[in-house]
Image (tube, helix red, strand yellow):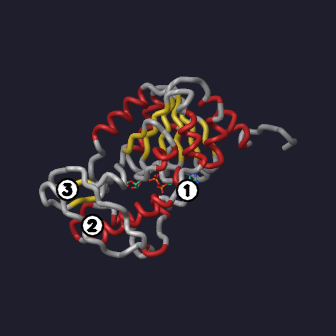
Amino acid sequence: MTHGDTGPDDPRRHLEQARSALAGDGPLVVLSGAGMSAESGVPTFRDARTGLWARYDPTELASPDAWRRDPDTVWAWYRWREHLVARAEPNAGHLAVARAAEGREVVVVTQNVDDLHERAGSPLVHHVHGSLFAHRCETCELAADAGPAPEDPVERLAPPVCRFCGGRVRPGVVWFGENLPAAPWEASLRAIDSASAVLVIGTSGLVHPAASLPDLAAENGTPVVEVNPGDSGLGPAVTAHVRATAGDAVPALLQR
Ligand code: OAD
């Protein structure tokens, strides 16, 4: 391969293809997954087996059964993740997505439960899997303020009680088997419908229905660019796959 040759696998060619698919001033939808926050030090969902929780399977903790069986362990795990996120900073990828909204409509649809897109300055973020910071009463659904997360990870912590009805306060995230929150989900479908381009960042594309959003865009003929150093389940919906991290690729892709 001679110098500068842009053969089919030349990463520079993918980057150029991706940049041109994202160019223009039409509405951009950014669909982010845990890989978006990896460079901010927030463990990705399926690799988050660090420290105190090495012996727990997160898919076991993020479930209604685990909550019914052992609410103190589940609550402690979520409070620990809040603490991790509170110490993290938005990375160059989050900041580039926020900056892009200065020049065009950018709707962020995130599977992440952290607040790093908001803290980077993105004006419109739909949390289709809920948010670590949206505690609510499991009985009356009233929003609850659980106060600051503990500084040190603990294995068990009793969830607070709803000040209105006395019910138990739960994490505001979507658990396996639960429905997605209707408002963010419907807004995400509308955003995909009117998008001129979709940028998918850091998701394994394994969890539906969020993982079906790129397919819906592709069915509309909307270009879909994926940023992921690894493979994902997104498959044929993707127009161009940039094999790089969010912090490296997203600023280069969205630079005006
Ligand atoms: P995963 O942990 O399944 O996938 C993270 C993806 O990010 C992988 O494909 C990695 O290759 C990629 N990745 C890792 N580091 C990256 C980086 N620096 N830049 C870009 N990509 C990187 O996380 P999600 O796909 O977000 O649901 O998982 C989807 C859902 O599964 C989560 O929202 C959660 C879980 O069940 C709920 O909590 C309801």
**Which is closer to the viewer, label 3 or label 2?**
3
* Disc assigned to residue 66: 2
Question: What amino acid type is highlighted by mark number 1?
Answer: Ser
Mark closest to the chain's N terminus, 2 or 1: 1
Give the amino acid at mark 3. Answer: Glu
Q: Secondary structure at mark 2?
A: helix
Q: Count the numbered circles shown.
A: 3
Q: Earlier in the sequence, mark 1 or mark 3?
A: 1
| In-front residue for pair 91/176 | 91
Rendered-image quadrant of the N terminus: top right
Q: Which residue is mark 3?
A: 138
Which mark, residue 111? Answer: none
Query: Where is mark 1, residue-wise?
Result: 40
Kind of element beneath mark 3:
loop
Would you call the spot at circle 1 few (<14 residues within 10 Å), some (14-19), or many (20 or more)? many
Q: Nearer the viewer, residue 208 or 113?
A: 113
Q: Is residue 18 above or below residue 174?
A: above
Coordinates of residue 217 in the picture (x, y in percent): 46, 31
Report the Cα–Cα distance between label 3 and label 2: 14 Å
